[in-house]
Image (spheres, grey):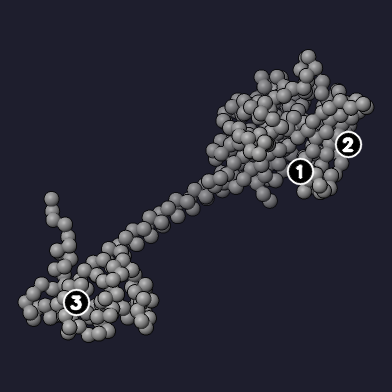
Amino acid sequence: MALTAKVKDELLGVRRSSVDAQAAEATAMIRFAGSYEATPGGLVIVADFAEQHVAQRLADLLREIIGVDSRLATIEPGSATKETRYEVTVDQGARDVVRHLKLVTPAGSPVVGMPRQIISGPVAEVEAAWRGAFLARGTLTEPGRTSSLEVVSPGQEAALALVGLARRLGVFPKTRETRGVERVYLRDGEAIGVLLSRMGAPRTRIEWDQKRETKQLNTRTGQRLATFDDANTRRSAQAAATAALRVERALEILGDEVPEHLAEAGSLRVQHRHASLEELGRLADPQMTKDAVAGRIRRLLSLADKRAAELGVADTHASIRDAEPDDV
């Protein structure tokens, strides 16, 4: 089960809340997933959800705290939506819902953010409002560099109101607009964990923290391995360059006396100073194994050092000493 589904499933199990907290949750669900408008037959409230159990949650809350019944309908995929949606409609008693939840101002205008009694109300109602908003339009992605907890908002005012509520809970989300849609999002992993607990999803918070720790451990392990691989690569390249210097000196010492098959391996080493032995083997014609290349280069160096001793000249190791920087 995806994390979003796990969070919502756990939030749907929250039952021990006051009537005011339940009202705050229902208010947020309508503000973030619904609309209300006047029709010739009277005021109508419509809210749609991606999950049937969430839609049923709103219907149950309205019945329990206000005594208003609603209709729950399934909207099959079509031209308007690609996925099945679940719609809650309130027509008989819609004005009672609006008045009880204070979804309009004293002057009769629709509330564009969140009602004042939630903004300045007890923390339990703030938590319930966030729970309702997440149930309505929230998502949670897996921990990682792009992980986030996000709520799609009906407008900028509602988004800013949700940010203000989150700050009362000790977390600090941000808002952004994407293709004309306002979103409230939180990326800090620790803050996401705090908000999950405050909304009422402590079990998912534990899973979230465990996944974060595993991800961080894997990242640190990967970084250590990358550092180790880089160090090995540098050492291999340095060894190859050193061998190339010795081979150059070996070819100078032996001159025309160098055997052809050893000269071929030596020339490959000099021409491709930073290539691995395996790569040199693939460049040979015909191709050779890396062990064959290494063996020929060792024989070339041994033969050259022996000849240098006979001639009384500097051997192949001298080229390395000459290449080292002087002490400062």
Image x and y of residue 39, in percent: 89, 27
Q: Which amino acid type is marked by label 3? A: Leu
Question: Residue at the location (8% across, 81% down)?
Answer: 310
Q: Which residue is mark 3?
A: 251
Q: Residues within 10 Å of mark 3 (few under 14, many from 20)?
A: many
User: In the figure, is residue 320 to the left or right of 158?
Assistant: left
The quadrant in which residue 32 appears is top right
Q: Residues within 10 Å of mark 1 (few under 14, many from 20)?
A: some
Q: Which amino acid type is marked by label 1? A: Ala
Q: Which residue is mark 2?
A: 71
Image x and y of residue 13, in percent: 74, 39
| Residue in front for this viewpoint, 202 or 286 | 286
Q: Residue furthest left?
A: 312
* Mark 1 residue element: loop
- Does residue 193 show up? no
Question: Residue at the location (77% across, 40% down)?
Answer: 49
Q: Which residue is mark 1?
A: 50
